[in-house]
């Protein structure tokens, strides 16, 4: 049984790392951006996450932010987030590298989290750099179509990675280091199609780690993985917590 094999490998490992994507948050009621019911069905991704478009006409992005982005903070972590959080507190994973911006790993107790694509926690004024917390942004957007800095009237941008933007360098480097050092790379809920994020499981495999992929759908890395489980993550998490 494949889940048993995963369990055994986790017992043997002393440097495991989790790498997560949208699939870990779908059980919290957050659809995959690209999937059915996802953000991309309602908003044109070529516009809403394009930095040039945002600077020229921020209203579209802020409509999305008001209706959906900051509403992510109303969602609750699910069993998979809690399982990953418990693995870290038991020193069984070194940390979690995530493509998600929803903060649910942090809220489920994970301490060492590398949000490769940023998160909704902070926003920054693009002119003066003043920082705004998500609840301040929500308050601004309750009264305004566009979030502007109260200090300099500059445009505020949430700390999430737009198309064409570099990933946050320190987070990417730390994730790369973690991936290079691990002996077990647990990919969960990621289709491994977004680069450069997807390079991290690859470097882990190249440096000798076991690569485990748990995802509903096939991924381009299934053929090089040591173990592939196509099953709902909540079932796997429940099984692992009970073992
Ligand atoms: Zn400002």
Image (tube, rainbow, N blue to C red):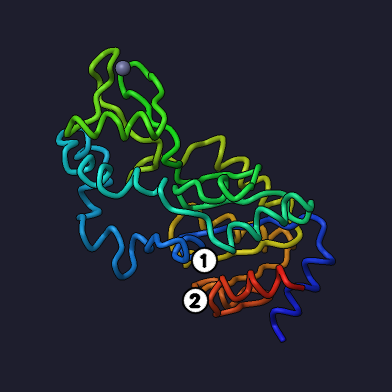
**Which quarter of the image is occupied by the N terminus?**
bottom right
Horizontal placement of 60 versus 103: left or right?
A: left
Identify the residue shown where x is 54% and y is 61%. Answer: 78
- Where residue 155 sits in the image (x, y, percent)? 25, 25
How far apart marks 1 and 2 lie (CA) works out to 7 Å
Horizontal placement of 142 versus 105: left or right?
A: left
Q: Earlier in the sequence, mark 1 or mark 2?
A: 1
- Where residue 57 sits in the image (x, y, percent)? 15, 36
Identify the residue shown where x is 53% and y is 76%. Answer: 232
**Which quadrant of the figure has residue 224?**
bottom right
The residue under label 2 is 216
Query: Are discs 1 and 2 less than 8 Å apart at CB?
Result: yes
Tell me the element at label 1: loop
Identify the residue shown where x is 65% and y is 57%. Answer: 84
Judging depth in this view, the residue of 230 and 66 nearest the camera is 66
The residue under label 1 is 189
Identify the residue shown where x is 60% and y is 71%. Answer: 213
């Amino acid at each position: 049984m494949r889940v048993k094999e995963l369990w055994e490998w986790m017992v043997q490992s002393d440097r495991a790392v989790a790498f997560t994507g949208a699939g870990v948050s779908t059980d919290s009621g957050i659809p995959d951006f690209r999937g059915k019911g996802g953000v991309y069905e309602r908003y044109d991704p070529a516009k809403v996450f394009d930095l040039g478009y945002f600077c020229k006409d921020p209203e579209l992005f802020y409509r999305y932010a008001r209706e959906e982005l900051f509403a992510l903070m109303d969602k609750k972590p699910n069993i998979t987030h809690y399982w990953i959080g418990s693995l870290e507190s038991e020193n069984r994973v070194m940390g979690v590298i995530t493509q998600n911006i929803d903060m649910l790993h942090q809220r489920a107790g994970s301490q060492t989290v590398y949000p490769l694509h940023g998160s909704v926690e902070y926003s920054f004024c693009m002119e003066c750099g003043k920082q705004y917390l998500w609840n301040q942004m929500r308050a601004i957007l309750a009264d305004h179509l566009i979030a502007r800095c109260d200090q300099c009237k500059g445009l505020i941008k949430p700390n999430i990675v737009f198309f064409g933007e570099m990933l946050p360098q320190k987070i990417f480097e730390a994730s790369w280091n973690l991936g290079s050092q691990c002996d077990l790379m647990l990919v969960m809920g990621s289709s491994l199609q977004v680069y450069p994020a997807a390079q991290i499981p690859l470097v882990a495999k190249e440096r000798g780690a076991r690569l485990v992929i748990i995802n509903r759908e096939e991924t381009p890395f299934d053929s090089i993985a040591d173990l592939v489980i196509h099953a709902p993550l909540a079932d796997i998490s429940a099984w692992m917590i009970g073992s």
